[in-house]
Amino acid sequence: MDSFVQTREHLYHIYNDRLGLGVHLDNSFEGHCEVVKKMKNSNLKNVRLSYIDGEKKSCSIFSSEDYSIILGIIFYDN
């Protein structure tokens, strides 16, 4: 697992921009829209983004720095 912390605003802008790319709207990026909405409405200053690589699927977890609040998860088909 890899993770890093960025400002919520920075991550929101990156992932909101990706919504405009058709490839990110298909089923292989499940949860993307939900994550963007929750980041927009969150009052967190910083967000931890963690990547977990699995055999068939991988995911990105968006959370508070200490993992006490999970904003959402994007699942990717490998």
Image (cartoon, grey):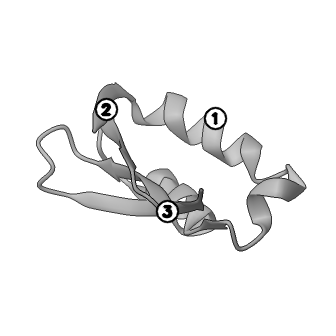
Residue 33, disc: none
Up/down of 13 relative to 33, above or below: above
* Residue 12 quadrant: top right
Q: Of label 1 and label 3, which has the lower sequence position? A: 1
Up/down of 12 relative to 7, above or below: below
- Residue located at (50% from left, 64% from top): 56
Could you tell me which secondary element the residue under label 1 belongs to?
helix
- Residue located at (20% from left, 58% from top): 69
Up/down of 4 relative to 74, above or below: above
Taking the view exactly as shown, the residue that stands out farthest to the right is: 22
In this view of the protein, which residue sits in the foreground, 77 or 11? 77
Identify the amino acid type marked 1.
Answer: Ile
Q: Of label 3 and label 2, which has the lower sequence position? A: 2
Q: Report crowding for label 1: few under 14, some 14 to 19, many 20 or more residues within 10 A (C-alpha).
A: few
Residue 14, disc: 1
Residue receiving disc 3: 57
Residue receiving disc 2: 2
